[in-house]
Amino acid sequence: MKRYWGLIVLVTTVILLAILGTACSSKEEKSGALPEVSSTPNASVSPSKEPVKRTITHTLGSIAVAEKVERVVTLERSFADHIVSLGIVPVGAVVRDGGDFEPYIANQLKGSASVGQGTAPNMEKLLGLKPELIIGTDKEHSKAYDTLKQIAPTLIITSDEMEKDWRGVFLKIADAVNKQELAKQQLKTFDENLLALKDQLAPIMKGKTVVFFKVTDKDTRILGNLSPLGKIAYEQLGLKYPESLKDESNETKIAAEILPEINPDYIFVMDTNVPEYVDHLNEMLKTPLWKSLNAVKDGKVVMVPLRATKTGFGLVMHNQFVDTLKRELLKK
């Protein structure tokens, strides 16, 4: 009997052990069915894409710039005008000899840092501004180009481009910051406004001559009819250029004694805010010769605190120039 019960206990033990073994094996299989977490990145995930770059060519080669450019440094004063016209405040810009920005645009350059004068920009300051684009000229910055392009892509505009076609320069800069359509629309609006003003001026200014005059620290000059501002005034607005003056794309240096021979109906005196010119201008305004001019006697002399140069500026200044002409010539 004992032997019988011993056999039952043995069999029961074996059965229980078998059941327990099966259960454990089942749990392990279920546990093994779960995916393992790997610390290795999934090989099927593609790496992040590089930012898209655009290629812009210029006189010293080509540059690759991002689709969106916001941090711009301008190394020529007129370039700040172009950039501001495109809705961008440059992070850095060059200043006048006196260390300040051009007065006509100073309010729109709040937040811009001075990088010195265009002839010798401060490279350390420029580097610290971390620009995405630098815009300079062949005349002043060709020698420093290799250094500049190590700081940021550098677009070089030639003096020839600046003197012959300020609009082309504006469009080229707009291309560099990817705002071509905005630039084209702004030029279209500008031309439409000029056309409308021309129609208003035609009956009032018929037969009346207009000159844009300046006194520098060295001489006296009259702005040429083919200069940037001259084209706006004489070609687009239809104002009359004195017949005694030759076609000129820059400025005509004249002796003050010649002014009575020209004797225009209107005189717009330019560059009145250039510090080194002011004393010389004030001396000129006191002379009997000046006071003898028809425009002076008729109260048709206008002081204009804008720079008249052979390279022109941009839409900010040109719009202010046109606004001055409109205000003064449409006076009742």
Image (cartoon, rainbow, N blue to C red):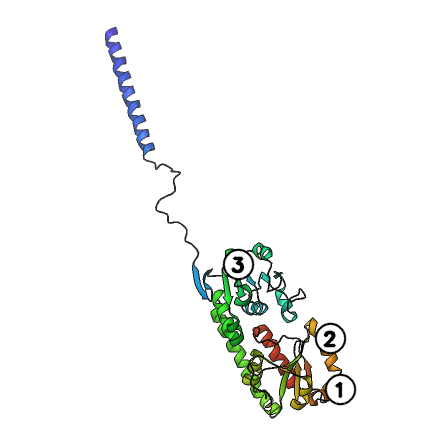
- For marks 2 and 3, give the CA distance: 38 Å
Which label's residue is closer to the chain start, 2 or 3? Answer: 3
Q: Is residue 218 above or below residue 8?
A: below
Callout 1 secondary element: helix
Residue depicted at 26% across the width and 19% down the height: 15
Label 3 crowd (10 A; few <14 / some 14-19 / many >=20): many
Q: Which residue is mark 3?
A: 148
Mark 1 or 2, nearer chain start: 2
Q: Amino acid at mark 3?
A: Leu
Question: Based on the displayed image, in which of its 4 quarters is residue 239 positioned?
Answer: bottom right
Answer whether labels 3 and 1 touch (C-beta < 8 Å): no
What residue is disc 1 on?
288
For disc 2, the marked residue is: 279
Say whether residue 131 is left or right of residue 324: left
SS state under label 3? helix
Q: Name the N-terminal-most of marks 3 and 1.
A: 3
Residue 115 place in picture, x, y as percent: 61, 60
Amino acid type at image mark 2: Asp
**Eyeballing the image, is 141 above or below 26?**
below
